[in-house]
Structures are given as C-alpha cells and as structure tokens.
Amino acid sequence: MAEETIFSKIIRREIPSEIVYQDDLVTAFRDISPKAPSHIVIVPNILIPTVNDVTAEHEAALGRMFTAAAKIAEREGIAENGFRLIVNCNRHGGQEVYHLHMHLLGGRPLGPLVAF
Ligand code: 5GP
C-alpha cells in the first residue's frame, strides 16, 4: 500500500488549499509555491504514487486530468496565449510529492522546456 501524502488531505478538504476544480475523478488546487502567475496542481482523487505505477485502470482519471486542465486554463484566461503541463516522475524528474500530479503553468512566457 502506497503511503498517503498531503495531497490526499487536500482532496478530502482536511487541510486548507485553494481548490479551483473538483469532480468524481480529479481535484485541482493552486500550488503553494507558484512558479508562474497561474500554477495549478491537478491530481487524481485516488492515490497513484508515480507515472511508473500507472495501469489501464487509471486511464479515465488520467484522461480527466487533461479535460480539467483545458477547463481550468480557459477559466484562468490563459488558454489562448498558451500554457505548459508538466508531470514529474521520481528523483531525476524532480518529483517531490509522491501522489501523481500534473502542473498547469501559465500567465507568462515560460521559456525553454528544460534548464541546463
Ligand atoms: P513535484 O515537484 O512533486 O512535481 O511538485 C509538487 C508541488 O506541490 C510543488 O510545486 C509544491 O509547491 C506543491 N505543494 C507541496 N505541498 C503543498 C501543499 O501543502 N499545498 C499546495 N497547495 N501545494 C503544495
């Protein structure tokens, strides 16, 4: 059994966060340490620790993360100019919280994909 992270508590609204979207499969909330004017974290409601743990059973939730991203980008007013979606995996990917999540970043030009 994977260990819960702070994100499970956010999903269950047990700790404060600014939730911008929630449905039966996913939850989205503002990142506590934003790296862009809009920085939203989108998570599946069930705990999947990393992309390495993804199976076919998760496809509905993972697909919904993209549907939610498109809706949120529209609401944030960043859809037309554009934005970036990032999913980090494990140490080399820079993953800090082991509950799979997608970063939605926008509101300014984001520069090159990877800094060297
Ligand atoms: P990772 O590096 O794992 O891809 O990203 C984790 C993200 O979660 C970071 O951008 C971090 O700022 C954010 N984060 C960590 N703890 C909390 C929290 O308690 N509340 C919110 N809203 N964001 C968090």
Image: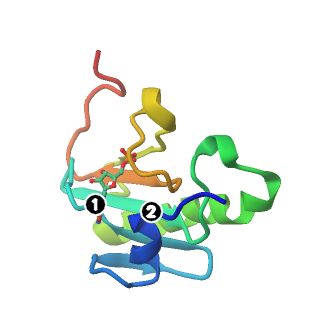
> In the image, what residue occupies the spot 77% across and 51% down?
55
The picture quadrant for ligand 1 comes to bottom left
Label 2 secondary element: loop
Q: How many numbered discs, if any?
A: 2
- Residue 81 drawn at (x, y percent): 31, 49
Find residue 13 and report its image quarter.
Answer: bottom left
Residue sitting nearer the eye, 68 or 90:
90
> In the image, what residue occupies the spot 37% across and 57% down?
79
Label 1 secondary element: loop
Residue type at tag 2: Thr
> In the image, what residue occupies the spot 50% across and 36% down?
90
- Residue 26 drawn at (x, y percent): 55, 71
* Cβ at disc 2 under 8 Å from ligand 1: no
Q: Is 77 on the left or on the right of 9, as rendered?
A: left
In the rendered structure, find residue 22 and report the number of the disc placed on it.
none
- Residue 6 drawn at (x, y percent): 39, 66
Residue sitting nearer the eye, 1 or 14:
1
Residue sitting nearer the eye, 50 or 38:
50
Q: In this view, which residue lies farthest toward the right?
A: 56
Location of mark 2 (residue)? 5
- Check the image and report above or below for 86 versus 44: above
Report the quarter where the C terminus lies. Answer: top left
* Cβ at disc 1 under 8 Å from ligand 1: yes
In the rendered structure, find residue 31 and report the number of the disc placed on it.
1
- Check the image and report above or below for 61 versus 82: below
